[in-house]
Image (tube, coloured by chain):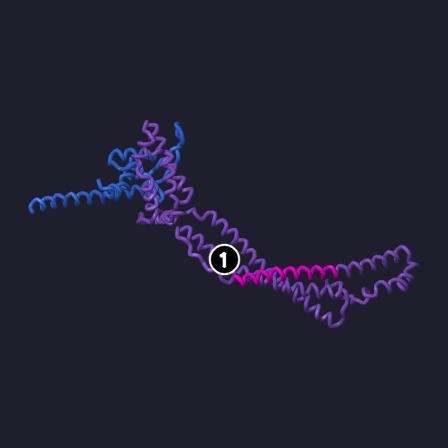
Chain colours: A purple, B blue
Amino acid sequence: MTRSEFTRRLSSALGSIPQNERGEILNDYFEHFEAELKKGKTEEEICASLGNPEEIARSYIDESTPSQGYNDGYSNSKNYENNGVNTNAASTGEIVLWTIASMFFVLIAGGFFLCMFFGGIGIVFGSFTVSWISFTVTEFSSGFVNIGIGAIFLMIFGACLSVISIWCCAKLFPTYFRFISSRISGKKLPKQKKKSKVFIIVILILLVVSLLTAMILISTGVTALIHDNIFEFLVDLVHDFIERHAPDALIYWEVHIFPYISDSVCSLPDALPSLI
Amino acid sequence: MNIQFKKGVLEMCVLLELCKGDKYGYEISSSLTKAIDISDGSVYPVLRRLKQEGYVSSYLVESSEGAPRKYYTITEHGRALADNSLQEWKTFSSRVNMLIENGGNENDTK
């Protein structure tokens, strides 16, 4: 047997041991080969005295099962750390897990925040809207209606987000943990049936639809409000301009022009702009 | 000689070797294989397990001739285990010897 054959066979027989530990083990044999070669032995001889690589590998795998260590805290904790064959096997998996976990915790927080914040706004705006509609319907109040309904949709969005976050914690994370623990114990994970797929798809659709609806409604509402405000603002600006630079023409503006262009603006109650 | 016999005492022998002073893997392996005729490959797994369980620790030493060498040093726990094992071994082997002598006598008489 040549050195490379020995190494290859040992490496593949150590397959169940994680990469970095396998590297350490192979390094021990690398050192052994180097030392023996320096002594003038041939690769053949060295391999012969080392023994069967598969058998060597088996002794590593057997060795790493829990053994009755010296009974004190130190070696116990050591055992705890190192006895599982793959202490570091799940390192990639763990990184992925914690990335996803932190993402979803943000989502949970975000979901509840959105739910409460926009829901609150929705209720406030909605009630104002309802009370306002009962008096008069103008351009201005349609902006309120849109924002109010949009905020209610945002509330639905927040609720869906919360449901998804909870679902992730209840279903997705345990699946992930099982996956990782199966990698640590080296047992194969039994394949699970995918339940509640329909439920989560419905929630996801609701999530997207409610968000889109809310965005459209709110943006149109805000546009309407801004439009009204800008209109009123411009009218005021013209009024101020005339008052300052041509006071004589003010009566002409107020009597002949202003009533025609700002019928709807003037009909708004004074209280409304201060609400925004 | 029976391989199980050797395996049992190998751990103790490794610890006793390290009680004499820090050594690198190959040194331990070659001195043990010379003494008790085991395959060279059987020492490294034992060293690794002893390290995992905290009985020995290792450190790298730059070597003038090639790659750095991994030296092993025995810990306090390792020393305690070595003393313990040695004590057990002595009692055990003396009893076995006694048994063999008695058994041999019995066999002779039968």
Q: Quadrant of the C terminus of chain A?
A: bottom right
Residue A267, image quadrant: bottom right
Q: Is residue A138 left or right of residue B23?
A: right
- Vertical placement of residue A175 versus B98, above or below: below
Quick one: SS at disc 1? helix
Q: Furthest-left residue in view?
A: B109
**Residue B39 point in image, percent of width and height:** 28, 37
Q: Is residue A71 above or below residue B43?
A: below
Q: Residue at x 56, y 58 (%)?
A: A109
Taking the view exactly as shown, the residue that stands out farthest to the right is A248
- Please determine whether, in this image, residue A254 is positioned above or below residue A75: below
Question: Which residue has dot 1 on it?
Answer: A172
Q: Is residue A210 magenta?
A: yes
**Above or below, B68 relative to B83:** above
Looking at the rendering, the stretch of residues picked out in magenta corresponds to: A197-224
**What residue is drawn where x is 37% and y is 37%?**
A7
Give the side of residue A228 with respect to residue A103, left or right: right
Neighbourhood count class around disc 1 (C-alpha, 10 Å): few under 14, some 14–19, many 20 upward: some
Q: Is residue A210 left or right of residue A223?
A: left
